[in-house]
Image (cartoon, rainbow, N blue to C red):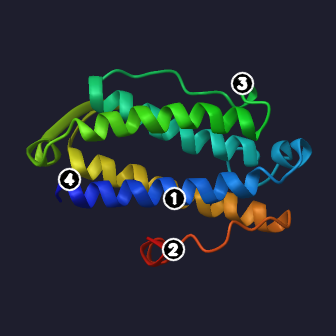
Amino acid sequence: MNFAEIELLFKYNDWANERILDGAANVSVEQLTAPNDLGWGSLRGALVHLMDAEYVWRILLKSGEHVEWLQPEDFPDVPAIRARWAGERTAFWDYLNSLSNDDLAGTVSYEGDGIMRHRVLWHCLAHVVNHGTQHRSECAALLTGFGHSPGNLDFTVFLSER
């Protein structure tokens, strides 16, 4: 995989995240924090997890350091989530733009679940986007149930809208 392909995947990731955040901006705080069975406890929990995964992976891939998970309770509403995520998006793009095609093909090593792992960098980056797809679908289901569907999140729709 080359940089242009990773760049396209992350542009899709940002586009899809924005659609989810736009839908979430229409829910009440009660809906945002309402318990559900989809994982992460609530829509807020899922949104913070999405953002957090990008943050945690960026730090891990850039420096090899582990950081504390973000806590949903630290984000009382969607504007707070969106503000933090905007900064994270900028930081992630700064990291991505520092990479070369050779870097993408290189190996990164990190400890996960007490096991030393060795991965090709672009595999980790593809995982970040794929992970987002999973949890955005959960958010989309919740938003649709609240009457605020984010619309179609398919990659091909993103390509058509470009």
Q: Earlier in the sequence, mark 3 or mark 4?
A: 4
Image quarter of the N terminus: bottom left
Q: Earlier in the sequence, mark 4 or mark 1?
A: 4
- For badge 4, the amino acid type reads Phe
User: 65 above or below 125?
Assistant: above
Viewer-proximal residue among 89 and 62: 89
Residue 25 rendering spot, x and y as whole percentages: 77, 50
Q: Residue at x 56, y 45 (%)?
A: 50
Q: Which residue in the protein does label 1 denote?
A: 15
Residue 113 rendering spot, x and y as whole percentages: 39, 33
For residue 3, the mark is 4
State yes or no: discs 4 and 2 in contact (Cβ < 8 Å): no
Residue 115 seen by the camera: no
| Label 4 to label 2: alpha-carbon separation | 21 Å
For residue 32, the mark is none
| Label 1 to label 2: alpha-carbon separation | 10 Å
Q: Earlier in the sequence, mark 1 or mark 3?
A: 1
- For badge 3, the amino acid type reads Asp
Disc 1 crowd, CA 10 A, few/some/many (<14, 14-19, 20+): some
Q: Which residue in the protein does label 3 denote?
A: 74
- For badge 1, the amino acid type reads Trp
Q: Which residue in the protein does label 2 denote?
A: 154
104 horizontally vs 152: left or right: left
Q: Residue furthest front?
A: 162
